Amino acid sequence: MEGFSHLDEKGNAVMVDVTAKSETQRIARASGRIYVGEEVYKAITSGTVSKGDVFACSRVAGIMAAKKTSELIPLCHPLLLTGIAVEFEPEEDKYAISCTCTVKLAGKTGVEMEALTGTSVALLTIYDMCKAISKRMEISDIHLEEKDGGKSGHFVR
Amino acid sequence: MEGFSHLDEKGNAVMVDVTAKSETQRIARASGRIYVGEEVYKAITSGTVSKGDVFACSRVAGIMAAKKTSELIPLCHPLLLTGIAVEFEPEEDKYAISCTCTVKLAGKTGVEMEALTGTSVALLTIYDMCKAISKRMEISDIHLEEKDGGKSGHFVR
Amino acid sequence: MEGFSHLDEKGNAVMVDVTAKSETQRIARASGRIYVGEEVYKAITSGTVSKGDVFACSRVAGIMAAKKTSELIPLCHPLLLTGIAVEFEPEEDKYAISCTCTVKLAGKTGVEMEALTGTSVALLTIYDMCKAISKRMEISDIHLEEKDGGKSGHFVR
Amino acid sequence: MEGFSHLDEKGNAVMVDVTAKSETQRIARASGRIYVGEEVYKAITSGTVSKGDVFACSRVAGIMAAKKTSELIPLCHPLLLTGIAVEFEPEEDKYAISCTCTVKLAGKTGVEMEALTGTSVALLTIYDMCKAISKRMEISDIHLEEKDGGKSGHFVR
Amino acid sequence: MEGFSHLDEKGNAVMVDVTAKSETQRIARASGRIYVGEEVYKAITSGTVSKGDVFACSRVAGIMAAKKTSELIPLCHPLLLTGIAVEFEPEEDKYAISCTCTVKLAGKTGVEMEALTGTSVALLTIYDMCKAISKRMEISDIHLEEKDGGKSGHFVR
Amino acid sequence: MEGFSHLDEKGNAVMVDVTAKSETQRIARASGRIYVGEEVYKAITSGTVSKGDVFACSRVAGIMAAKKTSELIPLCHPLLLTGIAVEFEPEEDKYAISCTCTVKLAGKTGVEMEALTGTSVALLTIYDMCKAISKRMEISDIHLEEKDGGKSGHFVR
């Protein structure tokens, strides 16, 4: 199907054949944001021990989810991720927490889905840990920031 | 920790004790949106067989992810989901696809995380299937639409 | 979609809503067979220690796979299986090994998919352990033998 | 144990040591069939939208299951599958649907178990989606069609 | 097999039939210890931010592993755990960290395996995070501390 | 964080970047022990068929768990294990069963966590299969025995 690498000529889903591609060093960085509102924002950024654990737990969830990407996204190739980092940044003007997930690989395909999945699940975990305070949080702005390695070259948004 | 059901009095993460809660019929509905841009939008909504498979594949991914929520979100309880539906709606004015995931349960805890996770992974799968066309898609506006069952009553956004 | 419980009125896949169904005691028994050929048959049924381990390993694989059914079959409900047994029977006249998987549940839906999945994976494991001897084995005759509990009554093939 | 690569000299199960093997391009193709009977056959092959979704859902299930092979079959090596395709073919004379799963790898071991597992789970998913219509379907004829790469050469059944 | 609930009369592994058992509130508490040596002990208990993250990460790992018990231990029943807590206690006299995992359930079987699995994986995660400093750590003393609910009554070690 | 490869300069958990490391042949061997007490010891080492199945089932569990290490231990890299063996040794003087798990890899990181995880889950499975006889078993002495490959050289305890 023209343009859709994941559909064959009949429009059926396939996991694209990358057998003959060579391994290169690849990196992808994705980011997203959860708008938590004033009350939640103050609770998780106030100087208490809780702050550490909300972020620590969400960071672990994001890292583990990036490793599970090929189990979640049907046509993603299994990959031996060689590095994953998840970072959070409080944004007081928006009452939001932004999240960046960076994934590295020496392999045959890009890792943007892994970075996007890590970001999504890290933000969902913040949602989960704060949902007793607010039902009106919103996860937004999840996109690819940067990608390098592979034949499509260096992309920066 | 006041307000945080998932942190104990020392601020440590715990899976909240719901042993003594009674089972009630519960439902949660979440939605989100992927901004795909004009080129991708036209490709997946044009009258070809491909459209069916992009949405069919993403729907299956969302349903399967909702079932995996307690594996992804560290403090979520395992639950016997009794119904899951994922729907997509093209939004031509935004060059976007919106997604709604509805989850049902007869059980002890709410299912908003399951609905949010199903929505997120369904949208990530659309991203994956279209990423050969555009690197500038964005997943946004993921939030709870409605929730019912349990002691906190009926919530509609 | 008439007749298809797993498709909604537009033909889209859904995990059927069973929220309001009551729990009953349910059982399903499925069977299948692997035709292994004379050489493999004699190797795994001769009086050696290996026989034990081929069957023990395949039995464990079948039991674990039955528990994973809702992760493998997209529209299956997660279920708290309350009993699983896998049995093998050598059939010398066919140079085959038959497998029966019995699954029990106190719950809201039938467990035939769990019994069929346990049977399939147990037979695939026998295949795996013997494939160095023959590439011409065949897995066949996988079907439901018996099912009870739930509104469709007692079925025996 | 002579002939059994998966049993050590005492007959105990082991995951065979392939550390020193070199990577080669490998392919395996397996097929199988589900006998669905006339009523189901007509329902899923009639010209309605449902047909698309039964096959789309089962195709996704087969692809995802092939990726899970090493979690299901105890002694299978984890592998970075580089390509997976699942195809269905209605066989009107048999009231059957045949399924073919093709798996590719650049790696150290053959991928026949992945192709067989993908085939099995794709057929089980068809069973699941049609079981409300018939309890007498049968999954059969699952075997290796072709295998290439690795030291055992090119096999065609 | 007398005494072995997980073996049938022929000595074959089975997942014990608990279909007819009634649900009761159950709790199990297990503990274990990792001897880390003086250097690691001082590194993880000194007053730095790292301490928080070693324990936070290991706590999350233990909680998530308790939920995975039925995937890891072949004959364990899947269970809807209703509460999980993991706690660590530095033991300076032993240069050890002790870990306690408490698991709750309203269900048909005991949860000691879940508590023991949570303890084991929490301790393995501490090992992982400190292994760059020492290769001589040892995980020991993993046992059931207390168990209640079900017909075998209240057990305290 | 000095000494902690799994914490970045702020003390946050990261999956260490090994992208640029070269692949080498690696091996790790870990061991541990379960003290079962006299009654259990005699039951599982008496000359009956049960003995085979307790050990066969636990061996399979250990092998499968070693493959799942990167899903269990948050900061472990996914790895393509190329060989896994699990062995048991009855120790009559201690009424204990010792377990050794050996893991091989051609890859970028060491496999000691995989060997330790395989050992732990194999011993937990013995516990599970014998817990109807005794609640006082104890899993102990889990440590690395030997490790080779990679820049830290050959380690023997």
Image (tube, coloured by chain):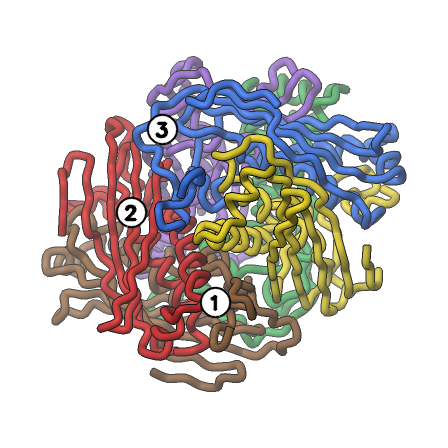
Chain colours: A red, B brown, C green, D purple, E yellow, F blue
Looking at the rendered structure, the kind of residue marked 1 is Val
Residue C16: mark in rendering: 1
Foreground: disc 2 or disc 3 = 2
The residue located at (76%, 68%) in the rendering is: E22
Dot 2 alpha-carbon crowd within 10 angstroms: few under 14, some 14 to 19, many 20 or more:
many
Q: At which x and y percent is residue B48?
A: 18, 55
The reply to whether label 3 and label 1 mark residues of one chain is no
Looking at the rendered structure, the kind of residue marked 2 is Thr
Dot 3 alpha-carbon crowd within 10 angstroms: few under 14, some 14 to 19, many 20 or more:
many
Query: In whole angstroms, how far apart are the C-alphas of marks 1 and 2?
Result: 38 Å
Residue A102: mark in rendering: 2
Q: At which x and y percent is residue D57?
A: 38, 53
Kindly state the secondary structure of the residue where label 3 is placed. strand
Foreground: disc 3 or disc 1 = 3
The residue located at (62%, 20%) in the rendering is: C40
Position of residue F112 relative to residue F27, above or below, is below
Query: In whole angstroms, how far apart are the C-alphas of marks 2 and 3?
Result: 27 Å
Taking depth in this image into account, of F11 and A44 the one nearest to the observer is: F11
Kindly state the secondary structure of the residue where label 2 is placed. strand
Question: Residue B65: which quarter of the image?
Answer: bottom left
| Residue C153 visible in the displayed image | no
Question: Which residue position holds label 3?
Answer: D105
Taking depth in this image into account, of D135 and E102 the one nearest to the observer is: E102
